[in-house]
């Protein structure tokens, strides 16, 4: 989903703000039960539909 980021001389990956936002989105989507394939291929409309189905599957739980 991401292009290989540039690396420093020490081998550390260097991410810009766009990549950081995308990585955060992917992490949150995975925490909510989305598969990587769902995230990779879905359009915005598809994401809304998938999210609606996932929300129905999430049990009610107290919020922190």
Image: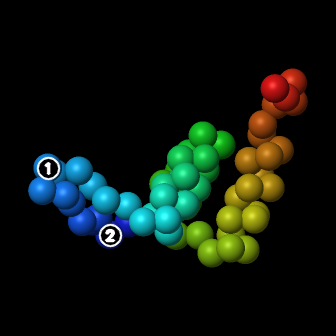
Label 2 Cα neighbours within 10 Å, binned few <14 / some 14-19 / many ≥20: few
Instruction: State the residue lying farthest toward the left.
Output: 9
Whichever of callouts 1 and 2 sits on the residue coming sooner in the sequence is 2
**Residue in the foreground of this view, choosing between 40 and 53:** 40
| Residue 40 showing in the rendered view | no
Residue 34, position as x, y percentages in the image: 59, 49
Q: Which residue is mark 1?
A: 10
The answer to whether residue 41 is seen in the rendering is yes
Furthest toward the front, the residue is: 9
Say how many tags the image has: 2
| Discs 1/2, front | 1
Q: Please give the name of the residue rendered at 68% of the width and 73% of the height, measured from the top-left corner.
A: 44
Residue beneath the point at 75% across and 65% down: 48
Q: Is residue 39 left or right of residue 53?
A: left
**Measured from the top left, where is residue 64 in percent x and y?**
81, 26
Residue positioned 74% across, 47% down in the render:
54
Please provide percent x and percent y for residue 16. 42, 66
Marks 1 & 2, CB-CB < 8 Å contact: no
Numbered badge on residue 40: none
Real-space Cα distance between discs 1 and 2? Answer: 19 Å
Where the N terminus falls, by quadrant? bottom left
Q: What SS does tag 1 mark?
A: loop
Question: In screen coordinates, is 58 left or right of 31?
Answer: right
Comparing 8 with 23, the one in front is: 8
Query: Badge 2 is on which residue?
Result: 3
Q: Residue at x 53, y 47 (%)?
A: 27
Image location (x, y in percent) of residue 30: 56, 45
């Amino acid at each position: 989903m991401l292009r290989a980021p540039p690396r420093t001389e020490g081998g550390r990956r260097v991410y810009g703000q766009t990549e950081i936002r995308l990585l955060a989105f992917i992490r949150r989507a995975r925490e909510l039960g989305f598969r990587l394939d769902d995230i990779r291929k879905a359009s915005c409309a598809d994401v809304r539909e998938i999210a609606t189905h996932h929300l129905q599957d999430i049990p009610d739980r107290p919020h922190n």
